[in-house]
Structures are given as C-alpha cells and as structure tokens.
Amino acid sequence: MNLLTGLWLSLQAAAAPADSVVGVVRAVLRAYPDTGSARSAGFVPLAVGRFTGGTPFQGIHWIHPRWFRSGAGGLSQPTFLLFAPVRGRLQLVGAAYSERIGAGADGPAGIGAAPAEWHRHQACFGVPGIGFLLADGLDDCDEMGGLPAPRQTAMVHVWSGPASPEGPFSHDNVALPFAALGLAVPAGSAEPVRPLAVALADSYGFRVPFVKRLDVSAARSPLQSDIARQRQAIARLVPDLRTAQAREDGAAYRALAARVTLHGDSLRALYGRLAPTPEYRHRLEAQYAQALGTHRHH
C-alpha cells in the first residue's frame, strides 16, 4: 500500500463514525485475503513463549513485528491481523491496532473519530507459581506479584466479519465459534451464549490461554483421556445443533446447547485439576471469568 493510499484511508476515517472506520479497515484488509499474503507482507503468527494457537473469541493473532515496534502507522498499517476458522477454513475476521505506552501512561480513547475501548497487555515476569505471562495491564501484574516490563501495549480490535454482537471494536467477538461451526449466533445479548460459545470453541482447539499452556505442559496427564472424551462429546452434538437451527426447533436447540455447556463445565473442572499450582489455577479461573463475561478485561 503506497503512502497516498494510506493517507487517504486515514483521512476518510478521521471524520467518520464507527461504521465508516470499519469500512476503511475492510478496504485495508483486502490486501491480506489469506495467511499466505499476510506472511508475504511481513505478518507472522504471534507466539507467547512456547504457546501459540487461537482463543475462542479472538482467533489467531498474526503480528507485523516492524509495525508493532514503530507504531503510529494509522489505519493503513494494522499491527495485527486476526484469523479464525469459518466453516472449516481459516479466514481473516479482523485487525488490531496497538500503541506501545509507558507503564503509567494513559492509552488511546478511540480509533479514527469513533470512540472505542482499548485494552492493555503487560509483559509480567517472575509471577509466583506461574513464571511469565501477559497480564491485563500494570495493575494486574502488580497484583500477581510479578515484575513488569518498562512498557505495556494498548490495543483495540476492529471486527470486519463476522460481525461482533458486542460492537465492531469489542474486545471479544462471541460470534466466532458459531461461524466456525456453521451455526447462527443465538439472538439477544451475547453474555448468555458465552458459556456455550466457549465450549464449542474448545472442541476445535481454540481455548483460553492457560488451557493452551496445559495442552503442552500436561500433555501426558492421565486426565487427558477424560478431556478428550468431553471434547469429542461436544463435537458430536454440533451437527444436531445445526439441524435444530435449520428446523427452527427452539426447544431442541436449547436442550442441545445445555448439554454442550455441561460438557464445557466438565472441561473447566478437569483443567482446574491439571493446574500445577494454586496461582496457576487462580489465573485459569480468572481467564474463564473473562471469557464467560463475569469479569471485565482491563
């Protein structure tokens, strides 16, 4: 993308409401229709230590290291691309913009002329019972007794599709697990469907960050056979959910969704048993609380 095109896109968004900002971002993202074009442009899958892969409501982050370090590239230079499975194929579903800020600095308050809530990530070292993690800002790192890096990252997501039920700049996109499996997002507030969505995502490998750690660190635990059975049980119910939606059979859908959610609850309990330390278990529960909407991200 040349300089004039990038300037035009930024000017278009500067005086535009949220829907126009999303339109500008969609135009930018046409340059990255797949992971191959993203890699050619300098993006690579983000890894936190040894741990990679996708989360239920954010997919997989691909980072542009140079743009991340330099910052201030405007809407024409997203720091991250967000990929997620949609009906079995990995697709670009959004972008993220970030700024490196001081530990005590105020972050941005919007994107373009549109108000948007940014969240923060703080590299946090030496956390008792855990080691290294990405905390939700400086205060979160301090509360866990870790040593923060000198700078933190402020970030905002822009969802280009599937649409997020919580808005185009929401931290999470609860629609992603449903899109991945060919299901429509249930109507109404996103919060009641979060437990169902988290369980569905677990069945195809997109899990909260500390569960992904357990997939690696506790791969040989005898509990893994129980975990596999719960994941398989969820996967077997997905075709029935699709059928119930297609027939507009609300009662059958609700009964099936309740069964999926119960399997998700069983998985959560099994992960707690796998946690190697009380501190790890506490962080795992905090991440579940965020995913289920009972605790807000910073």
Image (spheres, rainbow, N blue to C red):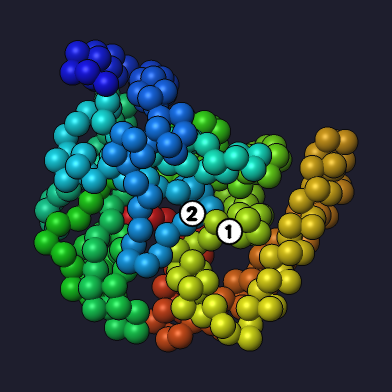
Of residue 196 and residue 276, the one placed in the foreground of this image is 276
Disc 1: which residue: 205
Mark toward the start of the polypeptide (1 vs 2) = 2
Image quadrant in which you'd find residue 27:
top left
Q: Relative to 291, is 242 on the left or the right?
A: right
Numbered circle sitting on residue 141: none
Find residue 110 and report its horizontal and vertical position in percent.
27, 33
Q: Secondary structure at mark 2?
A: loop
Q: Is residue 31 above or below residue 61?
A: above
x 34%, y 62%: residue: 48
Q: Relative to 56, is 4 on the left or the right?
A: left
Q: Circles 1 and 2: CB distance less than 8 Å?
A: yes
Q: Is residue 3 above or below residue 193?
A: above
Q: Is residue 139 above or below residue 172?
A: below
* Amino acid marked by disc 1: Gly
x 28%, y 56%: residue: 121
Quarter of the rendering occupied by the N terminus: top left
Find residue 73 and report its horizontal and vertical position in percent.
19, 31
Q: Relative to 43, is 59 on the left or the right?
A: right
In this orientation, does residue 135 appear?
yes
Disc 2: which residue: 54
Of residue 159 and residue 295, the one placed in the foreground of this image is 159
Find residue 159 and report its horizontal and vertical position in percent.
45, 34
x 85%, y 42%: residue: 243
Find residue 136 and report its horizontal and vertical position in percent.
31, 60
Q: Secondary structure at mark 1?
A: loop
* Amino acid marked by disc 2: Gly
